């Protein structure tokens, strides 16, 4: 569960996120939509605890992110928009490092590593350096690292940029298994069609402000537009 | 010719960056520039002393001077040759603009020539700068005019280009036949090994003895040796001949100068022609990332962590640091150079012309300051940069349930312990070789232990206070504002430490000279205590500030 109350982030005098509040229940997939520069990445970084809010609260699974950062980070998994990893570690070494830090027993680690890497067609590359991986391959390794941890909350910043269609399908299947286990998923995306298909709820952010939030049906009613999510989005952000 | 557009772009970007300099950058440039000028005038006066001394030697004074000059040119030639091996790999195959250049309709041969200019410049500018004071000292000693200097400038251009051709041709050929990024790594290692080797070999050859006729018993043989050409088939000898004939006002000068230019044009013409075939395929081959087969078994840190669960975060982070560090070739070439430095350092200490035992013990005490400087430089390279080098991957650590203090501990142990060992080698060997007495040995070993620890903490902390996660290379981090502050701070701390310890050391020497003088142990303890307390307070305060700052990083 993610609970955000009156979240504000200022860079100097520029307000990147302005008094944002929202709730993502456990087992829910929340789609966070908005044009470039709207404040999506800033919001997600604050939830992940790698940026601190100017004001407001973020509570993840009952833990306040600013007050007990380490406790909260145990529950959160985050994948940034650019998959920067350690170029001098192999995929297996990287995944083991993640598994070790999050106290996953080594036997479980090895099972999860072979499961997810074969799922993403990377098993034969498991012992090669991440520096030789493409953008999409690194992203798959990061997705594997997140899923093997069994977190309470997963934050994805543009998760499917760089993935091939088959991996996108895989990704969707994998996250729907996660939600069944009660994981909340918070996902920024540009791909409205994907948001329409898999998100239980969407929020549209524009210039740092949430201009609309709720199930897609509710958004349709509010905007008086019965078209696709794309139509609603274009109308609200024009 | 398109090649001129390529040069024009260089000049434009140079002017752009010059006009944009302001604030810290301007200050930094002024500081580096003045440090460079101080160094160059220092070199000038030492060269002048040596040359004046040689000139004073009866009969053979001038021959000696030209012999030394030939040796200086030969040294420079081999140094440029070796650095061109390391540098040409980067400029020819790993410049950031290669992708752009090769995608535009430019003849690869022209790109090649453009990159050759870069190679010649980057592999020779430091030596060129160091040779200017030598030439000026030569002019002053022999009373030569500015025509001589102009002649030198004209002759040195083909000289450095010919020295760099070695590396360029080597890179061209090896990358063509072994197209892989591992070829670059291998040449880097071999290059730094050779630099280290030349450096040590030159020092071991005791060049100061070569200048003393008494080391060769028969004078005639000595004169013969002096008059024989030094490596006559190398451009360094042709440059020497150009300079001697010019200084004597002989027309032969034009002959030697033409020889330099003729060979220069011939070689570059051949390279230019062959580069059409070799260069493009080398550039594409250089992008092949070497296949690396990582281990399937778990590392020793991971196995150890099952035995000591309370240390597990430390061990896991240590393993990460170790693998990331050791798999980076640029660190290895640096380590090789440091090992050479240590050898030369100890060798120089051993050969200091000191007569009395007291003098030797005293030098051992001053050695603490010198070792403190070396430790600071090493902490700048390895500890100060270690936070910034996390770079764009820093989010991984930052989003993990870890405190920054855990990361600090790991980095401190991983880089600080080798630094401490190195500092102990520097002081321990010096004490041993100079036969320092027990008291001085104790003081120097004790203080360098505390100092290297403090300087390591300072390096790491200042690196965390002034991080730059968007760095492109290590050098950029080292020469940043924070790096400068750290060096100033570390030097100040070293000076204060030496000053505090000077008290008891002085009393120790007085009591050795004067048996009636009573050495009051009280002052020794007070000084040591003050030194330890100051060290701990400084490192504690700075480290605390750094941790606070690091917890708040926004990336
Ligand atoms: N570290 C920063 N410093 C200053 N401004 C920033 C910083 N990070 C983001 N911004 C600004 O905040 C706004 C929102 O950025 P971001 O959250 O990255 O947008 P997006 O919705 O595209 O992910 C942008 O105008 C951006 O320029
Ligand atoms: Mg973004």
Image (cartoon, coloured by chain):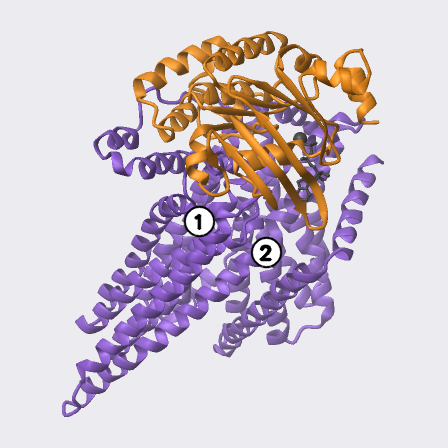
Looking at the rendered image, the quarter that the C terminus of chain B falls into is top right
Please name the residue that numbered disc 2 is placed on. Answer: B126
Whole-percent x and y of residue A118?
Answer: 46, 9
Please name the residue that numbered disc 1 is placed on. Answer: B382
Looking at the rendered image, the quarter that the N terminus of chain B falls into is top right
Figure colour of chain A: orange
**Foreground of the two, A52 or B116:** A52
**Ligand 2 appears in which quadrant?**
top right
- Which numbered mark, 1 or 2, is in the foreground of this view? 1
Q: CA distance from mark 1 to mark 2?
A: 23 Å
Closer to the chain start, of discs 1 and 2, is 2
Whether label 2 lies within 8 Å of ligand 1 gets the answer no
Q: Residue at x 62, y 18 (%)?
A: A160
Q: Residue at x 70, y 65 (%)?
A: B149
Q: Is residue B151 above or below residue B363?
A: above
Q: Residue at x 55, y 74 (%)?
A: B45
Residue, far bottom: B516
- Secondary element at tag 2: helix
Question: Which chain identifier belongs to the purple chain?
Answer: B
**Foreground of the two, A41 or B208:** A41
Question: What is the count of numbered marks?
Answer: 2
Whole-percent x and y of residue A104?
Answer: 34, 23
State the mark number for residue A122. none
């Amino acid at each position: 569960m993610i609970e955000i109350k009156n979240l504000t982030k200022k860079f100097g005098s520029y307000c990147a996120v302005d008094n944002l509040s929202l709730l993502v229940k456990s087992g829910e997939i929340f789609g966070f939509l908005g044009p470039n520069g709207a404040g999506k990445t800033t919001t997600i970084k604050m939830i992940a605890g790698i940026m601190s809010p100017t004001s407001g609260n973020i509570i993840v699974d009952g833990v306040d992110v600013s007050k007990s950062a380490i406790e909260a980070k145990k529950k959160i998994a985050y994948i940034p928009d650019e998959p920067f990893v350690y170029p001098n570690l192999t995929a297996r070494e990287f995944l083991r490092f993640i598994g070790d830090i999050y106290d996953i027993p080594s036997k479980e680690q090895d099972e999860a590593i072979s499961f997810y890497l074969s799922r993403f067609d990377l098993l034969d590359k498991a012992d090669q350096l991440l520096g030789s991986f493409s953008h999409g391959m690194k992203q798959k390794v990061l997705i594997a690292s997140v899923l093997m941890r069994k977190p309470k909350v997963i934050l994805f910043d543009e998760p499917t940029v760089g993935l091939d269609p088959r991996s996108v399908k895989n990704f969707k299947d994998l996250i729907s298994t996660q939600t069944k286990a009660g994981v909340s998923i918070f996902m920024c995306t540009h791909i409205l069609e994907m948001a329409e298909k898999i998100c239980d709820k969407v929020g549209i952010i524009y210039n740092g402000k949430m201009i609309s939030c709720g199930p897609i049906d509710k958004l349709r009613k509010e905007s008086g537009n019965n078209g696709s999510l794309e139509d609603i989005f274009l109308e609200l952000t024009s | 010719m398109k090649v001129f557009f390529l040069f024009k772009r260089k000049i434009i970007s140079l002017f752009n960056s010059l006009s944009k300099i302001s604030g810290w950058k301007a200050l930094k440039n002024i500081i580096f520039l003045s440090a460079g000028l101080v160094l160059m005038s220092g070199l000038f006066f030492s060269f002048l002393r040596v040359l004046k001394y040689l000139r004073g030697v009866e009969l053979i004074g001038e021959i000696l001077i030209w012999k030394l000059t030939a040796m200086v040119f030969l040294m420079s030639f081999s140094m440029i040759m070796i650095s061109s091996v390391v540098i040409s790999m980067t400029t020819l195959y790993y410049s950031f603009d290669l992708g752009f250049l090769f995608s535009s309709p430019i003849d690869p041969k022209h790109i090649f020539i453009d990159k050759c200019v870069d190679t010649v410049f980057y592999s020779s500018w430091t030596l060129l700068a160091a040779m200017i004071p030598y030439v000026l000292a030569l002019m002053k000693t022999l009373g030569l005019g500015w025509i001589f200097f102009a002649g030198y400038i004209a002759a040195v251009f083909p000289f450095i280009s010919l020295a760099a051709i070695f590396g360029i041709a080597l890179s061209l050929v090896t990358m063509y036949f072994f197209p892989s990024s591992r070829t670059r790594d291998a040449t880097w290692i071999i290059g730094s090994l050779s630099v280290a080797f030349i450096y040590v070999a030159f020092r071991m050859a005791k060049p100061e003895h070569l200048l003393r006729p008494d080391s060769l018993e028969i004078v005639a043989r000595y004169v013969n040796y002096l008059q024989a050409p030094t490596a006559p088939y190398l451009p360094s000898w042709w440059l020497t001949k150009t300079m001697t004939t010019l200084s004597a006002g002989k027309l032969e000068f034009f002959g030697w100068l033409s020889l330099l230019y003729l060979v220069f044009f011939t070689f570059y013409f051949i390279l230019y022609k062959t580069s059409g075939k070799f260069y493009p395929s080398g550039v594409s081959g250089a992008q092949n990332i070497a296949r690396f087969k990582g281990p399937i078994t778990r590392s020793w840190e991971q196995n150890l962590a099952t035995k000591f669960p309370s240390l597990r975060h430390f061990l896991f982070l240590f393993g990460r640091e170790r693998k990331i560090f050791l798999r980076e070739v640029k660190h290895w070439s640096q380590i090789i150079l440091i090992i050479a430095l240590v050898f030369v350092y100890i060798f120089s200490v051993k050969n200091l012309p000191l007569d009395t035992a007291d003098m030797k013990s005293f030098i051992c005490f001053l050695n603490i300051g010198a070792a403190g400087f070396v430790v600071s430089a090493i902490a700048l390279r390895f500890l100060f940069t270690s936070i910034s080098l996390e770079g764009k991957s820093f989010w991984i650590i930052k989003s993990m349930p870890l405190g920054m203090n855990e990361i600090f501990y790991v980095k401190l142990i991983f880089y600080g312990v080798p630094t401490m060992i190195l500092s102990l080698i520097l002081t321990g060997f010096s004490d041993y070789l100079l036969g320092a007495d027990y008291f001085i040995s104790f003081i120097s070993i004790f203080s360098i232990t505390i100092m290297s620890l403090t300087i390591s903490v300072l390096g790491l902390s200042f690196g965390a206070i002034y991080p730059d996660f968007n760095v492109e290379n290590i050098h950029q981090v080292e020469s940043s504002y924070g790096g400068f502050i750290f060096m100033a701070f570390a030097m100040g701390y070293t000076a204060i430490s030496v000053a505090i310890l000077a008290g008891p050391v002085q009393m120790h020497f007085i009591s050795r000279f004067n048996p009636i003088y009573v050495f009051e142990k009280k002052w020794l303890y007070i000084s040591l205590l003050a030194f330890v307390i100051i060290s701990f307070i400084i490192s504690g305060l700075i480290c605390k500030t750094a941790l606070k700052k690091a917890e708040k990083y926004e990336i």
